[in-house]
Image (cartoon, rainbow, N blue to C red):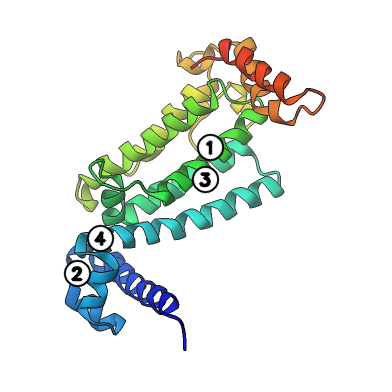
Amino acid sequence: MNPPSDAREQARAAITAVAADLLREHGSAAVTTRAVTELAGVQAPTLYRLFGDKDGLLEAVAEHVLAEHVASKRGDVAAAAADDTDPVADLVAGWRRQIEFGLANPDVFRLLGDPTRAHSSQATATGRGVLAARVHRVALAGRLRVTESRAVDLVHAAGVGVVQALLEVPADRRDPGLAEAMLETLLTGILTRDLVDNPVDNPVDSLVDEDAGTPGDVDDPVATAAVTLRAAAADLQALTPGERALLVEWLGRVTPA
C-alpha cells in the first residue's frame, strides 16, 4: 500500500492530467469540479484539498501544460548544441514553436501571462532560461549586436505581444504574416549583418540589403566583439574567477544595451 504522500501525488497527477485534457480540448469553461472529479475518479473534497478551488486547479493545470512544452524545448536546445545547428536557425525555430504553442493553448497563455497572479510560474522561468540558452549560442557565434539580457527581453516581449495580439482577433481574421513580420523586425535589431550567409529559412534578406535603411546596417564591430567575448568569458580558463568577473564588468561598459 502506498504511503499517504504517494497517494496524494497520484491523485494530484490524475486530476491534473484530466483537467489538462479538458482545457486543451474545450477551454477553461469545461474544467468544472464535476467533470474533473468524475473523469479522475475522485471525490470533490479531494480536489479542494489538493488545489483549494477551481482557480487553483486551473493554475496548476496551466503550469503542467507549459512545463511539458518547456521540457521538450530544453531537449531541442540540447540537440541543437550537440548537432552544431546554426544558432540563429535554432532561435528562429524556437520563436515559431513558441508562437504556435501560445495560439494552440490560449487559456494556458492567458492564465500564466496574467500579471495579477499570486504565484510566479516555475515553468515560465525555466522557459526563459531555454530562451537565454539559445541567445547565448548566438552571442558565442559573434552574431549578436546587443547584450544577451537585452536580446532575451526583446524576444520574450515580442513573442508575448504577438500571441496576445493574435488571440484578440478571431482565428479566421488573424494576419498570418504578423508573427513573421515581427520576427524580421526583431532580428534586425539584435543580430549582426552576416545574415547573407545565414541559412535560416525566413524572410530576413532585407536585413542585409545596404539600401534597406534598417538599423541592421550600422553594426559597431567593437561592441559586437565585446558581446561575443563576454559570452565566452566563463570558458576562459587562463584567467582566475576574479579576473573573469572583472573582464565581464569591463566588457559590460562597452556593450550596447
For mark 4, what is the residue?
A: 56
Give whichever of discs 4 and 3 has the lower sequence position: 4
Q: Inspect this view and state whether residue 51 appears.
A: yes
How far apart, in angstroms, are the residues tagged by discs 2 and 1?
A: 35 Å
Q: Which amino acid does label 1 sit on?
A: Ala
Which residue in the protein does label 3 denote?
Answer: 93
- The image quadrant that residue 230 belongs to is top right
Instruction: Please name the residue shown 57% across and 43% down the image.
Output: 90
Q: Which residue occupies 31% across, 43% down?
A: 163
> Image quarter for residue 252?
top right
**Is the Cβ of the residue at disc 3 closer than 8 Å to that at disc 2?**
no
Residue situated in front as seen by the camera: 64 or 216? 64
Q: Name the residue under label 1.
A: 132
Percent from the top left, x then y, of residue 123? 43, 51
Q: Does residue 125 appear left or right of residue 20 in this picture?
A: right
The Cα atoms of the two marked residues, 2 and 4, are separated by 15 Å
What amino acid is at disc 2? Ala
Q: Name the residue under label 2.
A: 30
> Could you give the CA–CA distance between mark 3 and mark 2, rounded to whole angstroms?
32 Å
Relative to 108, does residue 249 appear above or below in the rendering?
above
Spatial distance from mark 1 to mark 3, Cα to Cα? 14 Å
Disc 4 marks a residue whose amino acid type is Gly
Q: Earlier in the sequence, mark 2 or mark 1?
A: 2
Mark in the foreground, 1 or 4? 4
